[in-house]
């Protein structure tokens, strides 16, 4: 077993000090994953990669201990936690009390109104929820590829799919999501 897997097992068994040992081992991987997710966000994002890593880490090893079968499962769960945090952040920013639905006006050119950027991430999340109701495996494949940054081979391994089936599911899910998102806008 890798050191990360041993520490995850210790956390699972209630060792409170094991969580302190885990962060230094996984921090760079989580930071890289967060930076990749943040690069896909629209400009003007107020959440930074470091904050995203810390928030996701707290969700993963916080009060509710989760069972992880190994390093890959941990990083897939981290990607899911980051996805949820980004979606919650996008929804929070969209609410009226936070300025959602209002137009931005530049101070130098007050006559020109700038439309607020659309939150494609929310549309993707809603479409993924619909896909999960139809076919959870395809939705999980998209989450692992898009949010965890896994290759098709890695995602297929986690889901127990053959390469051919994973490729077919990936092609279908991308086309289905595209139709759902473009029809909604």
Image (spheres, rainbow, N blue to C red):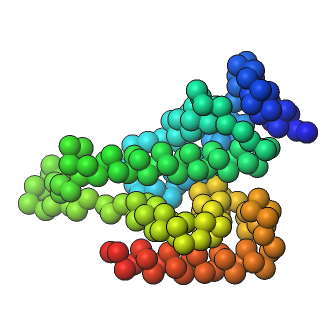
In-image side of 99 versus 153 (left or right): left
Q: Quadrant of the C terminus?
A: bottom left
Give the percent coordinates (x, y) of residue 159. Answer: 74, 62
Q: Is residue 141 above or below residue 10?
A: below
Q: Name which residue lies at 59% across and 57% down.
A: 147
In-image side of 1 versus 79 (left or right): right
Q: Residue furthest top?
A: 17
Q: Residue furthest front?
A: 133
**Numbered-mark total:** 0
In-image side of 47 versus 96 (left or right): right
Residue 165: name its quadrant: bottom right
Q: Is residue 102 above or below residue 60?
A: below
In front here: 98 or 11? 11
Q: Name which residue lies at 24% across and 44% down.
A: 98
Question: Can the viewer see residue 142?
Answer: no
Give the percent coordinates (x, y) of residue 13. Answer: 77, 26
Q: Quadrant of the N terminus?
A: top right
Give the percent coordinates (x, y) of residue 84. Answer: 49, 49
Give the percent coordinates (x, y) of residue 59. Answer: 56, 35
Residue 117: name its quadrant: bottom left
Q: Residue furthest left?
A: 111
Q: Residue furthest right?
A: 1
Q: Name which residue lies at 70% across and 19% down.
A: 16
In front here: 24 or 165? 165
Q: Name which residue lies at 80% across and 74% down.
A: 163
Q: Is residue 109 above or below residue 54?
A: below
Question: Can the viewer see residue 90?
Answer: yes
């Amino acid at each position: 077993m890798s050191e990360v897997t041993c520490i995850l097992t210790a956390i699972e068994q209630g060792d409170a000090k094991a969580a302190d040992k885990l962060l230094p081992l996984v921090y760079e991987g989580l930071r890289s994953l967060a930076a990749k997710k943040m690069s896909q966000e629209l400009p003007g994002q107020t959440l930074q990669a470091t904050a995203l890593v810390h928030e996701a880490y707290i969700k993963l090893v916080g009060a509710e201990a989760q069972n992880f079968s190994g390093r890959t499962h941990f990083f897939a769960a981290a990607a899911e936690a980051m996805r949820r945090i980004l979606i919650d952040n996008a929804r929070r920013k969209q609410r009226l009390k936070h300025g959602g639905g209002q137009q931005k006006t530049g101070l130098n050119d007050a006559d020109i109104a700038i439309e607020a950027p659309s939150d494609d991430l929310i549309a993707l999340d809603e479409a993924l929820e619909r896909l999960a109701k139809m076919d959870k495996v395809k939705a999980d494949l998209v989450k692992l590829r898009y949010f965890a940054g896994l290759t098709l081979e890695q995602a297929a391994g986690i889901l127990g799919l053959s390469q051919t089936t994973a490729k077919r599911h990936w092609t279908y899910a991308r086309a289905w999501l595209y139709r759902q998102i473009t029809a909604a806008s």
